[in-house]
Amino acid sequence: MISEKMQNAFNEQINKELYSEYLYLAMKAYFSELNLQGFVNWFDVQVQEEHAHAMGMYDYVIERGGHVELLAIDKPEVEGKTPVEIFEQVLRHEEFVTSRINALMDVADEVKDRAALSFLDWYLKEQVEEEASVGGVLATLKLIGDDKNALLLLDKDLQTRVFTAPVIG
Ligand code: OFO
């Protein structure tokens, strides 16, 4: 059975993952208003991924005999006013999430929960991928600068992103 400390740490992270879903939903609306449908698609996939991340932990807490407690989700603030600024915020957010997964692993270490450590390995690898994928879009956006035609080409490219339900753990 999962320890109370580990369970509470998972419940906090479920909240962070649901907040991520909420934040990306707000960013999706920003790009919808600009009618950049490829970016809308990219954020839609991101929203589904964050939901899957939250549910992976939700199911895991239950599987380990713990209690899922859903905490209040903060109002998301989209800080940027341009696509570059939005993606800078996404990258900062993903780096924050990575630090939270590391903190969760520290708790698992502390309470000697090897099963949780092994489960969390998947999340750590996922964060490496997420930071790389966001960093890639950000680098392209910086190259594009004020070139609207190039922005539309990137938009077309982002339209091809597809959500695949992850196999977590
Ligand atoms: Fe859940 O990986 Fe992004 O935040």
Image: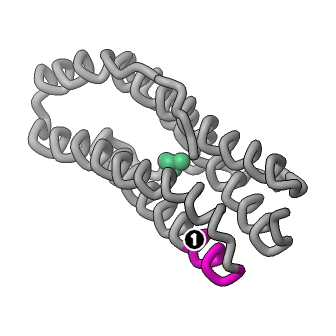
Pinpoint residue 26: horizontal percent, then vertical percent.
Answer: 56, 36
Query: Residue drawn at (41%, 62%), measured in percent from left and top?
Result: 95
Query: Residue drawn at (32%, 41%), measured in percent from left and top?
Result: 82
Is 114 located above or below residue 71 in the figure?
below
Give the magenta part as a residue range: 103-111
Marks counted in the figure total 1
- Report the front residue among 81 and 25: 25
By secondary structure, the bulk of the magenta-drawn segment is best described as: helix
Mark 1: few, some, or many residues within 10 Å (few <14, many ≥20)?
A: many
Question: Which coloring applies here?
Answer: one colour
Whether disc 1's CB lies below 8 Å from ligand 1 is answered no
Q: Is residue 119 left or right of residue 66?
A: left
The reply to whether residue 72 is in sight is no
Q: Is residue 55 left or right of residue 164?
A: right
Pinpoint residue 23: horizontal percent, then vertical percent.
Answer: 57, 44
Pinpoint residue 148: horizontal percent, then vertical percent.
Answer: 15, 25
Q: Is 108 within the magenta?
A: yes
Quarter of the picture containing the N terminus is bottom right
Where on the picture, by quarter, is residue 116? bottom right
Q: Is 61 within the magenta?
A: no
Pinpoint residue 58: horizontal percent, then vertical percent.
Answer: 75, 46
- Report the front residue among 96 and 107: 107
Query: Residue drawn at (63%, 69%), measured in percent from left and top?
Result: 114
- Report the front residue among 154 and 120: 120
Where does label 1 land, which residue?
105
Query: Residue drawn at (38%, 16%), measured in percent from left and top?
Result: 37
SS class of the residue under badge 1?
Answer: helix
- Report the front residue among 97 and 19: 97
The reply to whether residue 45 is in sight is yes
Give the amino acid at mark 1.
Met
Is 132 located above or below residue 148 in the figure?
below
